[in-house]
Structures are given as C-alpha cells and as structure tokens.
Amino acid sequence: MTKEEIYAQLDEVFQDVFDDEEIHVNAETTANDIEDWDSLEHINLVVAIEAKFGIKFNMNEVVSFKNVGEMVDVILQRV
C-alpha cells in the first residue's frame, strides 16, 4: 500500500467521523485544522482508523502523533 492510497482511505475515514465530505487530509493536517476534532472525536477517529486498516496503535503512539503524516508513517509500517 502506498502513502497516496493511505491518504485516500484516511479521507474517507475523516469524512465519515466528522460527517464532512469536504475534508481532505495531508501530512501536515492537525486537530487545529478540523473544527470538530476534539478529544472525544480523536478517540472515535483512532478507533475508525484502526478498524479501516486492521491495525492497533499503542497509547504512546496515539498521544505522540503531531499530525496526520506521523500517523500515516505508522500505518505504512503495519500494513
């Protein structure tokens, strides 16, 4: 799986979790870029991403992600 394919699938997950078809993420996307991305939605987002890719993040990874790009790097290592 390529980074481009991961970003395309993440777009779908983000659009579903935040109920906004206009969301398109990139490596620099952070919670500050998406209006409804708060701590509760972060949990929902992580769970949805884990389900989509069939992986599990550990707690240290979840709290250390600074942007979507760091999340994609971990996804790429595990798929």
Image (cartoon, grey):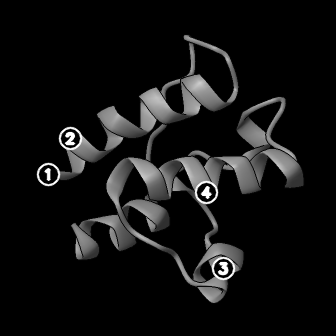
| Cα–Cα span, label 3 and label 2 | 23 Å
Q: Position of residue 29 (x, y in %)?
A: 58, 45
Q: Are marks 4 and 1 in contact (CB under 8 Å)?
A: no
Of residue 79 and residue 65, the one placed in the foreground of this image is 79
Q: Are marks 2 and 1 in contact (CB under 8 Å)?
A: yes
Q: Position of residue 27 (x, y in %)?
A: 44, 51
Tell me the quarter of the picture where residue 21 sits.
top right
Q: Residue at x 52, y 75 (%)?
A: 57
**Amino acid identity at mark 4:** Val
Give the residue at mark 1: 2
User: Which tag is nearer the camera, tag 4 or tag 1?
Assistant: 4
Left or right: residue 9 compared with residue 11: left
Q: Position of residue 63 (x, y in %)?
A: 72, 77
In the picture, the disc for residue 64 is 3
First in sequence: mark 2 vs mark 4? 2
Tell me the quarter of the picture where residue 22 sits.
top right
In the picture, the disc for residue 46 is 4
In the picture, the disc for residue 5 is 2
In the image, farthest residue toward the top: 21
Q: Residue at x 44, y 30 (%)?
A: 11
**Amino acid identity at mark 3:** Ser
Label 2: how many Cα within 10 Å (few below 14, some 14–19, many 20+): few
Quick check: 1 above or below 15? Answer: below
Q: Residue at x 34, y 60 (%)?
A: 54
User: Which tag is nearer the camera, tag 2 or tag 4?
Assistant: 4
Label 1: how many Cα within 10 Å (few below 14, some 14–19, many 20+): few
User: Which tag is nearer the camera, tag 3 or tag 4?
Assistant: 4
Q: Under tag 4, what secondary structure? A: helix
**Amino acid identity at mark 2:** Glu
Quick check: 66 above or below 24? Answer: below
First in sequence: mark 3 vs mark 4? 4
Q: Under tag 1, what secondary structure? A: loop
